[in-house]
Image: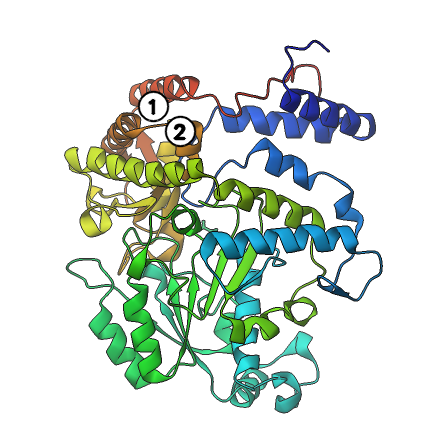
Amino acid sequence: MTSTVSRESAAFANALDVIAQVEPRVAAAIGQELTDQRESLKLIASENYASPAVLLAMGNWFSDKYAEGTPGRRFYAACQNVDTVERLAAEHARELFGADHAYVQPHSGIDANLVAFWSILAHRGESPALEKAGVKNVDALTEADWGQLRRALGDQRMLGMSLDAGGHLTHGFRPNISGKMFEQSSYGTDPQTGLIDYAALRQRARDFRPLIIVAGYSAYPRLVDFAAMREIADEVGATLMVDMAHFAGLVAGRVLTGDFDPVPHAQVVTTTTHKSLRGPRGGMVLCTSEFAPSVDRGCPMVLGGPLPHVMAAKAVALAEARRPEFATYAQQIVANSRALAEGLLRRGVRLVTGGTDNHLVLVDVGGSGLTGRQAEAALLDAGLVTNRNSVPADPNGPWYTSGIRLGTPALTTRGFVEDELAQVGDLIADVLAATTAEGESKVKYRLDPQVADRVRARAAELLDAHPLYPEISLDLTGRA
Ligand code: DSN
């Protein structure tokens, strides 16, 4: 090895060689994933690229350790090093977000939300609900059992943002356990403006009297007034929980401040760590001191043993997010998102709410006679990776949809700036204009192949100007 090989290249090359000794196909797939990600123009609003330090913090012997409990109070012996990284991650999180308490064990955003729900229930003195409901077999709950359970929970209600307005499944919807645990109602957006209708939300909260009001979204392109939501929650005696999974990076980077920063306003805030926050795949809960004891019981209440290697990576990512350059990154995410929106609007593409204030843009393709599914597939044919998404009052439902969700955190990490995002907007508009639905099909479409080729070539040029992981050069040939 020569001195021109970077530390990162050496680390990953050696890791792949070690893996290849046991199962070369896995090493080849890991290498191929790097190639594929490098060649893909990623506009998935929930994805990003973690730093080599974050990735390397996960690939080690911390993975071998059980550590149920909390630092200094474990159900297993010899957890002193896990205690160190968990304490560091929590300390960075508290400092970064200005939270009283941070719990960094959740394995995902859904897990973080589950910890939050049970913690709010426990805080209200409603646990243990299963015992109270007389439910014996939790693996085979009937609708009647769920009814019993809900009654034991005190007819607990959750008010969350409706799915087609941009809310998330875990905010009380049927396909998720939250929709079984709680009687759910939702708030939406004003049909004219596409913005959250706070007056309607207040009235809904007064009528419904929820235990929990959930704020946060996975497909709403504007700011949320968390101060107003806390006022509504206080008025009806609800706990305000904010799921900031999508925009945690914008909170960390001080783009969302004052009324738009959830942490000073919500009693409980959940997040993932891998979206705009750019950490490892995982979750986290922040809360006020009064909720800390019940949040800390997340494992074993609803979580399996913590993943110490991922907590180590969270500590690294949160340390990165405390650096001034992360604030610059967060500002650039939004500048890029606005440039993307403006590029699309210039071409007459319809956007939900007419623009964006955050990291995402929601395109309504319904007017062009396409479903979101057709648009998603056509864009992918042209080398642009997006995902279909419902729009408010979507006539095509959540499977086919009428929308395309675009996000800028990943391209911003690669170094894209406004002018390039405006060009990406043009490429998207080109593909949408060159795509037609086949007959009545919601799936089949025709994309002009010349347009697809031209867009793919231009996308490749843009990507070449901003190599992904430039510090990592691996000879990936011959590994298969
Ligand atoms: N899968 C995430 C997203 O794409 O928004 C949320 O769960």
Other residues around mark 1 within 10 Å, as few (<14) / some (14–19) / many (≥20): many
Q: Mark 1 points at which residue?
A: 452
Q: In this view, does 141 lie to the left or right of 147?
A: right
Q: How many labels does the image show?
A: 2
Place of residue 226 in the rendered image (x, y in percent of width and height, measured from the top left)? 32, 65
The amino acid beneath tag 1 is: Ala
Question: SS class of the residue under badge 1?
Answer: helix
Q: In this view, does 314 lie to the left or right of 136?
A: left
Position of residue 32 relative to residue 148, above or below, is above
Other residues around mark 2 within 10 Å, as few (<14) / some (14–19) / many (≥20): some
Place of residue 443 in the rendered image (x, y in percent of width and height, measured from the top left)? 37, 43
Q: Measure how far apart labels 2 and 1 are at the Cα level.
A: 7 Å
Residue sitting at 39 percent across and 64 percent down? 264
Mark with earlier residue (2, 1): 2
The amino acid beneath tag 2 is: Asp
> 258 and 304: which one is in front?
258
Q: Name the residue under label 2.
A: 381
CB of mark 2 within 8 Å of CB of mark 1?
yes
Position of residue 423 relative to residue 66, above or below, is above
Q: Is mark 1 within 8 Å of ligand 1?
A: no
Residue 239: image quadrant is bottom left
> 105 and 387: which one is in front?
105
Residue sitting at 65 percent across and 50 percent down? 311
Q: Which disc number belongs to residue 426?
A: none
Place of residue 268 in the rendered image (x, y in percent of width and height, measured from the top left)? 47, 68
Tell me if residue 442 can be seen.
Answer: no
Question: SS class of the residue under badge 2?
Answer: helix
Tell me if residue 257 can be seen.
Answer: yes
